[in-house]
Image (cartoon, rainbow, N blue to C red):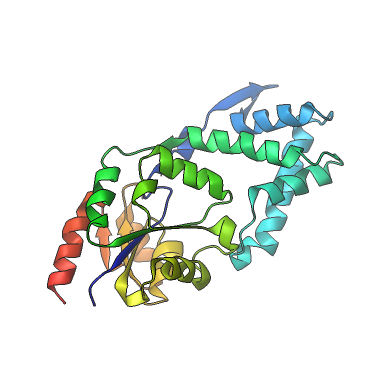
Amino acid sequence: MPIRAVVFDLFDTLVDLLTEEIPFEEHDGRRIPAFVMRLHRLIGEVAKVDLLEFMQVNRDVDAELRESRHSKHIETPSQLRFARVIERLGIDDASLPQRMVETHMAGVRAQVRELDHHPEVLSELARNVRIGLCSNFTHAPTAVAVLESAGLHEHMHAVVVSEAVGIRKPRSEIFEAVMDELDVAPEETLHVGDSLSADVGGAAALGIRTAWITRRVRDPGEKLHAFVGTPPDWCIADLAELPDLLLRSDAEQ
C-alpha cells in the first residue's frame, strides 16, 4: 500500500540535541552542569537549599519516577517532576515548578541545532503525503517552539508529544494518536526516528514501516546487530533521502 503519511521523531531526527555540549560551571572544585546551577539559583530565590542536597533530591526523584512511570512508558511532565523535587525539599511555592520548567527548557533549547535543509525536505514531502510529529518529550510547548524556530511546524499536519498524550514510545497509544490525527492506517504510514527501540520497534509492532536515521547514531552497524526487535525497513543518514525513498516505495507497490 502506498505511503500516505510520514511521521517524525523530534530530537536527533528533525533537529539535533547536542547533550554532549552541555556547559558546566565550577563549584567548590567540582564541575556541575550549568542547568543544575541555574535551577539551584532559582530555588535560592525562595529558600536556602544546599546545592548538593538539591542535586541528591533531584537524582532521587528522577530514579523514583523512572521506576514508577518510565519503566511503564508513562510520561512524566517536567512540571510534575519539579513539583516533586520542591515538595521533597520542603518548599511551599506553587509558582516555583513552572519557573523551574521555563529555566530548564531554555537550557534545552540552547542545545538544539537546527538543520537548514530540513524545512525544504518537509515542504517537498508535504506535497504528496501528510506530515506528523510523534515525540517523547516532557514539555509539549517547548517541542512546538523548537519546530517553529526550525521552520518545520508549518509543514506539520499533526503534532503529538508524549507529555500531552501521557504515554511514551514505544507504546502503541502514542503512535495511534498521531495516526488518528493524520487519518491514516498503519500500513499507510512511515515512521522516521533515531531510536531502534522506541521508534523502530514501537512503530513496527503496529505494522508501520520504519526508517532509522543514523545521523547522530554512533556505530550504527554495531547497534543494529545488537538490536533484537524488528529491523528497520530502511536505514538513512539524512532526511534528504526520504523523497526518493518514497518514490521508490510507491513504484514497488
Q: Tell me what residue is drawn at x 36 percent, y 45 percent.
A: 152
Image-quadrant location for residue 100: top right
The answer to whether residue 33 is seen in the rendering is no
101 over 28 or under it: above or below: below
The answer to whether residue 21 is seen in the rendering is yes
x and y percent of residue 52 in the render? 75, 34
242 over 52 or under it: above or below: below
Q: Tell me what residue is drawn at x 46 percent, y 37 percent.
A: 20
Quarter containing the C terminus: bottom left
Image-quadrant location for residue 130: bottom left
155 over 189 or under it: above or below: above
Between 134 and 44, the one lying in front of the other is 134
Between 194 and 244, the one lying in front of the other is 244
x and y percent of residue 86 in the render? 79, 42
Seen from this angle, which residue lies furthest left? 251
Q: Tell me what residue is drawn at x 24 percent, y 78 percent.
A: 1
x and y percent of residue 13 in the render? 37, 50
x and y percent of residue 233 in the render? 27, 69
Residue 80 located left or right of residue 46: left
Image-quadrant location for residue 42: top right
Residue 236 located left or right of residue 179: left
